[in-house]
Amino acid sequence: MTASTTGRLGVEAFQALFDRCSNWGRWGPDDQRGALNLITPEKRVQAAALVKEGATVSVAHPVNTVGDAENTSPAVHLMVRAGDVFDGVTVTSIADHLAVSPHGQAHSHLDALCHFAWQGNMYNGHPVTEVKSNGARANAITIGQDGIVSRGVLLDVPRHKGVEYLEPSQSITVEDLEATEQAQGVKVESGDILLVRTGRHARRKAQGPWDSRSTLAGLHHDVGPWLKDRDVALLGSDGVSDYREHPFDCCTHPIHVLSLVAMGMQLLDNQNLDDLAAACQARSRWAFMLVVAPLKLVGGTASMTNPIAIF
Amino acid sequence: MTASTTGRLGVEAFQALFDRCSNWGRWGPDDQRGALNLITPEKRVQAAALVKEGATVSVAHPVNTVGDAENTSPAVHLMVRAGDVFDGVTVTSIADHLAVSPHGQAHSHLDALCHFAWQGNMYNGHPVTEVKSNGARANAITIGQDGIVSRGVLLDVPRHKGVEYLEPSQSITVEDLEATEQAQGVKVESGDILLVRTGRHARRKAQGPWDSRSTLAGLHHDVGPWLKDRDVALLGSDGVSDYREHPFDCCTHPIHVLSLVAMGMQLLDNQNLDDLAAACQARSRWAFMLVVAPLKLVGGTASMTNPIAIF
Amino acid sequence: MTASTTGRLGVEAFQALFDRCSNWGRWGPDDQRGALNLITPEKRVQAAALVKEGATVSVAHPVNTVGDAENTSPAVHLMVRAGDVFDGVTVTSIADHLAVSPHGQAHSHLDALCHFAWQGNMYNGHPVTEVKSNGARANAITIGQDGIVSRGVLLDVPRHKGVEYLEPSQSITVEDLEATEQAQGVKVESGDILLVRTGRHARRKAQGPWDSRSTLAGLHHDVGPWLKDRDVALLGSDGVSDYREHPFDCCTHPIHVLSLVAMGMQLLDNQNLDDLAAACQARSRWAFMLVVAPLKLVGGTASMTNPIAIF
Amino acid sequence: MTASTTGRLGVEAFQALFDRCSNWGRWGPDDQRGALNLITPEKRVQAAALVKEGATVSVAHPVNTVGDAENTSPAVHLMVRAGDVFDGVTVTSIADHLAVSPHGQAHSHLDALCHFAWQGNMYNGHPVTEVKSNGARANAITIGQDGIVSRGVLLDVPRHKGVEYLEPSQSITVEDLEATEQAQGVKVESGDILLVRTGRHARRKAQGPWDSRSTLAGLHHDVGPWLKDRDVALLGSDGVSDYREHPFDCCTHPIHVLSLVAMGMQLLDNQNLDDLAAACQARSRWAFMLVVAPLKLVGGTASMTNPIAIF
């Protein structure tokens, strides 16, 4: 730990931030859908109206099967039977197998609300012990099982700042986000899916991998209230939305806790925002229809997903 | 085997059917996208224009983790760590793991073109041996990695016939499909995603599971040329599109071979069409925007997916 | 449930049986090795002295990868890369992958003491909640990590009774065991590994598979005290040692609970005792050196094993 | 690559070494048991006679589930259900799951003969293409399914050299082995299981992990003929028996190829030889009974194992 003790913040400071962001009770005492409630039918119709060219862009990376210092739980993709045993008589088809622990620094995935807790509770006061060893009984990934369809907005922060990528030590502030909004001519509104680009993968291409669990560019914790005020429905990043190092000892991932637990807002981690940024820039258009289709995984804490932006 | 030898059909008959349906060379000698080429940008814009209410419906079943006579390769969904070990200090998050072999009678999935071959070759003449033990080098699931977005059309055959479900011994003919089109006031067009309902799961609810690998309602093999003539881009079913028993000894799954290999058309197997049928019926509307977002799985033969219909 | 309510036994009856069998405290209040304590160095030397011919026999079935009504969680054995991609330059080796949930009706495995609990506690009073979602903190499979080496004794009950196999409805009594001992000229002693053959797999070969979770031949619950008095160190069977139907509502597997929880004695389930029985019969010798080598799986509840009998 | 081109050796040199070591045809043209044929019944009886104290020592490391730069395919050990859901009524047992790709730098495992090939062929001329995507049809791990039981001999090279561990750049020569034999008062004989200690894990403890795929202490390739002349039945190491850098471009692992392919001798990789070395040293005794019990995995290329040394 190289961070100095000067400027460290305590539990009270975080609790105040948490309370400022909380959506607990907002949609009833039993609600588990959280910020997905902000995506109204009208919002979906508005999103579909953004489809003007019929172009689509994936917002995910390929499933990563190569273990390395960053990808410490590589996906396992194997053939059940390949072309070498096909004979058209006893073996007439080819098949494969995929095993993956979606959470982690190398997999594009959607976090369920049950992925984090604060002071023993998940979103809307459900005790974290409701996530049992045989599946989550509350706040599972299935809240989005009919699809998360809304307007997506990309804020390309490094582009606005005129750099290829942010450094891992940098955090993104409200001022950064609003300046990027202004420069791009777009404004994040209630029910939007917000994607914030840090240029993480451009940096990896340029400088090689680093220990992204220790330092990673992301949203400053003071962005929490801004996300709440803008009523963002779903937040994503090419990092994990959080920045490291941050000043809290009481909490490893302040933006995760504020989003998943306080706001009830799911997160898209480790997305591929480079292709999307190029598509947006080519069109000078930073809003699009976005469809996220998590697996119907009863009791799941996450889903591998391939969100599709449609222009 | 209860099928009589009377009426069995040979390799020549199947080859003729295959040639009648073939799209090989249609989009160039190296093409691997097959019938996805039929989904044009205009088609996607047309699909988005179908979003009038902002309602979404999942077209998948929950991931099935319970092994039984039908689900012989159950998915494995396990917790990496659950709420019982959360302490907010050393354990601050909850995580899970999913392992699945997507092909089979119990998983809602998308078949890649490399899932089947005919006479040693896959779609467009790629040898089946190009599917290696470490991944497919041709016709992999990644052809749809930017999302498959088009107009979806549901043909609810049992509803049109006035029954709850088809019997496993039944096959669906061209006449059945066209009569259903007429009754529903919809026509399958070039680039559409066609979903054909047999009522398989309604039957399971009513009568219990049966060995669906032996008998299952599906499309008569003579529907192949009709699919080709209509230029369907993607075909799905609550069964596996094929019917059993069929009269071919040279081929276990005639519709799979005609679709995946001859036409280069991917398949959605074992889908949940009951919720979708109810949604269509409630609106008397059988066409909708459909988004299929397979994982970006390099070399994959399939992907678990949760296709989302948007009205 | 076809068992009549006549003759059902309550919690008090089972608790009395449990107390009668208990080894709690016998090897100290913190002990987790349980009946493995009965295998002394002298016992191992005695076992090795049984090696007179240098013949070995596996006591396990092949790893079972084929899902069916009995094998509802089949093992997954897949190639990472096979001979089709070997080129001696970039691919110079072949590799595979194995995934398995060892417990269940179709896998030869060793149960750790933490596999069962009674009234909320595991062997020696460790609360079952000590088995966390990220691993067992007490009574894990690692108590045998330096190998379980002792005298093995096979009691071949159907052979003694002059039948090919027991019927699933049959239970094995103390009288049966002692009569078999006498007939075979062997006596189960302190520290022995006792293997009891029911002929389950001979029956499967003859009559086909049945739902072994509902009915299965095994030890009558009154055998518990006998196992305790004989100070058996490890118990195994071609079934799961338990018999079904038994008269307890308070407990699904009386022998499992008496063995694992009360006695602290691990269990070998679903073993292949047919090859061993043939080897014993050929030699008219029913005692041998037996080596069980569970994986060093920290926090594990079981291990796939291949116990080796040495004559 | 820092190795100079000076002193590089070509295919002819390796082929000569291969031919010098070959056991092809020695046990018949169809043999797949290879050097296991050297373990005779007499050898097993001799091994059992070494059991004088009844002490056992594991020769494996714990199953390694923590991904890092060395362990790029960590094992996945997860609970199916843990103590948090045990209620004694609907949930009466605890269970877990293990998935592992045994080959690699971090798992203690036994290599099957089919793990390597030379010039397209495996041991005894079986083409490497006999290892299919759905399992090996020749030279699979099942040749040891009845247990590999013999005299084990540990040669503790760093101890003899008076160092804590060898450096990764070092190779072990015939002279080193014979000097160690002499110092320890033991001689490797036909049918023995030879374990060669390099001190790899002592070095890791002292200096931290390094990229063991690039440099690792092991047997010089000229040890091949010595292994052949001594008729070793099974070879193991705390490394992977091979040394890196070696002078061959035609072959990534000369000792693997000479052992697995030419001699038909299986290998134990990444073993824990520190506990065994301590046990040997305490007794001034370097020979013991050794039992290796690979899983009965039909078509497998490896097995996780926990070899047990018995003194």
Image: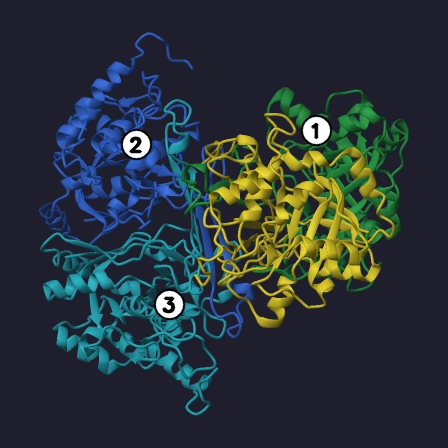
Chain colours: A cyan, B blue, C green, D yellow
Q: Are marks 1 and 3 on the same chain?
A: no
Q: Residue at x 45, y 66 (%)?
A: A126
- Residue D88: x and y in percent read 64, 51
Please identify the quadrant where the C terminus of chain A is shown. bottom left
Label for residue A209? Answer: 3
Q: Nearer the viewer, residue A182 or C282?
A: C282
Circles 1 and 3 in contact, beta carbons < 8 Å: no
Looking at the rendered structure, the secondary structure element under dot 2 is loop
Q: Which residue is mark 2?
A: B127
Q: Nearer the viewer, residue A114 or B52?
A: A114
Q: Chain of mark 3?
A: A
| Mark 2 to mark 1 CA distance (whole Å) | 54 Å
| Mark 1 to mark 3 CA distance (whole Å) | 62 Å
Q: Residue at x 90, y 30 (%)?
A: C185
Q: Chain of mark 2?
A: B
Circle 1: is it few (<14), some (14-19), or many (20+) Cα within 10 Å?
some
Q: Chain of mark 1?
A: C
- Please indicate whether residue A14 sits to the left or right of residue C60 in the image: left
Q: Which residue is mark 1?
A: C169
Looking at the rendered structure, the secondary structure element under dot 1 is loop
Q: Amino acid at mark 2?
A: Pro
- Please indicate whether residue B36 sits to the left or right of residue B240 in the image: left
Q: Nearer the viewer, residue D298 or C38?
A: D298
- Residue B76: x and y in percent read 48, 47
Q: Amino acid at mark 1?
A: Ser
- Please indicate whether residue D234 sits to the left or right of residue D43 in the image: left
Label for residue D165? Answer: none
Circle 2: is it few (<14), some (14-19), or many (20+) Cα within 10 Å?
some
Circles 2 and 1 in contact, beta carbons < 8 Å: no
- Residue B19: x and y in percent read 19, 22
Looking at the rendered structure, the secondary structure element under dot 3 is loop
